[in-house]
């Protein structure tokens, strides 16, 4: 592997610069939960000065469509940091001029939600970096964590790269690998990666500043891409997919949009499940009961065993409660569409 994959051993709780040196000035671009540990790590280190946090504007959210700030805005304001929420940054001369007046050293971006144009990337004294949740050039794009889970990968990681105008194609400074456990879903894996990024980012910026991390061009011939997650991607077809594939979908979409099957003209959302062999060769789409507390759905290969489910309009419940409440209907309609 050509990229440097570990930083020198040191305590992450101490400042990375010697006392008396001026703090490194950072503008932090982020809108999602992934950025919270990273922002928290930099904001708590006196070696850095967060000049401003740039995030997406407040938007309607939920069934009530209440105007809601991003989680990063809420977190940043709780730290007493200045927050900027431009509708767009491309072609925004006022925003560009504001950043130019700040004499910043770094732009640090993670899950921001807009492409940062070249004229903005050229402003910092040192560079603009992005923190991406995959082993680049694998999984460039908007959904690297979900895609790794969908594909049943056994490892993923964090890439720290220099930004350019293209999507995740900048030169790489650092890669750190993380194993993916069978029990991981989107929420747990995102937390692992974001916490790791928060631990390594202070020292990564220090090593970039000192010239100890040399950027290396990505091998574009090895690049793969991942798409934006759409709601219809979570509809499960157990007759076509294997149990392992269905399980990977459930893990990938555990936070949103949540996977579901159609049963008796109603949606059953499956929040957690496991797999088992289909020893009896039960036809795909069929629902069977290995024991009184267990329900299994036959897939194209193998059995999917739901553990936590939610009938549309109801609350999530353990499968035992679901069987007890709907056993008669399940026996009368023993299949999913």
Image (cartoon, rainbow, N blue to C red):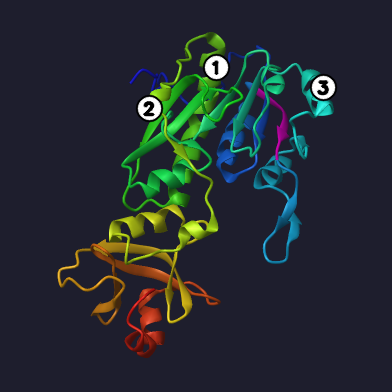
Which stretch did the figure color magenta?
48-55
Front residue of 178 and 285? 285
Asked if residue 47 lies left or right of residue 91, the reply is left
Q: Kindly state the secondary structure of the residue where label 2 is placed.
A: helix
Task: Return the residue found at the far left.
Answer: 279
Residue marked by disc 3: 97
Task: Tell me whether circle 2 and circle 3 mark residues in contact (CB < 8 Å).
Answer: no
Front residue of 185 and 41? 185
| Residue 90 rendering spot, x and y as whole percentages | 74, 30
* Residue 206, numbered circle: 1
Q: Is residue 50 magenta?
A: yes
Q: Is residue 56 magenta?
A: no
Q: Earlier in the sequence, mark 1 or mark 3?
A: 3
Q: Earlier in the sequence, mark 1 or mark 2?
A: 1
Mark whose residue sits in front, 1 or 2: 2
On screen, residue 14 above or below 210 = below
Asked if residue 213 lies left or right of residue 49, the reply is left
Q: Quadrant of residue 306?
A: bottom left
């Amino acid at each position: 592997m050509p990229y440097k994959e570990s930083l020198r051993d040191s305590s992450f709780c101490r400042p990375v610069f010697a006392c008396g040196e001026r703090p490194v000035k950072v503008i932090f671009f982020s809108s999602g939960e992934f950025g919270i540990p990273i922002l928290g790590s930099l904001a708590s280190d006196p070696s850095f000065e967060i000049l401003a946090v740039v995030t997406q504007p407040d938007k309607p959210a939920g069934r009530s469509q209440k105007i809601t700030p991003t989680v990063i805005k809420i977190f940043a304001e709780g730290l007493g940091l200045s927050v900027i929420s431009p509708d767009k940054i491309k072609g925004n001369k006022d925003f560009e001029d504001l950043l130019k007046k700040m004499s910043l050293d770094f732009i640090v971006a993670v899950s921001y939600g807009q492409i940062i144009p070249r004229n903005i990337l050229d402003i910092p004294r040192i560079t603009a970096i992005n923190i991406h949740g995959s082993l680049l050039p694998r999984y460039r794009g908007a959904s690297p964590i979900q895609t790794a889970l969908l594909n049943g990968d056994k490892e993923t990681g964090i890439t720290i790269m220099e930004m350019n105008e293209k999507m995740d194609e900048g030169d790489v400074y650092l890669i750190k690998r993380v194993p993916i456990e069978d029990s991981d879903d989107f929420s747990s894996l995102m937390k692992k990666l974001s916490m790791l990024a928060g631990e390594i980012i202070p020292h990564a910026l220090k090593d970039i500043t000192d010239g100890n991390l040399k950027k290396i061009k990505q091998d574009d011939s090895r690049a793969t891409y991942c798409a934006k997650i759409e709601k219809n991607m979570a509809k499960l077809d157990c007759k076509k997919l294997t149990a392992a594939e269905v399980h990977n979908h459930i893990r990938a979409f555990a936070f949103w949009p949540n996977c579901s099957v159609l049963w008796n003209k109603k949606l059953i959302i499956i929040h957690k499940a496991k797999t088992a062999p289909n020893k009896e060769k039960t036809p795909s789409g069929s629902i069977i009961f290995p024991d009184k507390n267990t329900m299994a759905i036959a897939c194209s290969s193998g059995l999917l065993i739901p553990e936590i489910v939610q009938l549309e309009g109801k609350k999530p419940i353990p499968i035992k409660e679901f069987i007890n409440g709907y056993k008669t209907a399940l026996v009368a309609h023993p299949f999913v569409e």
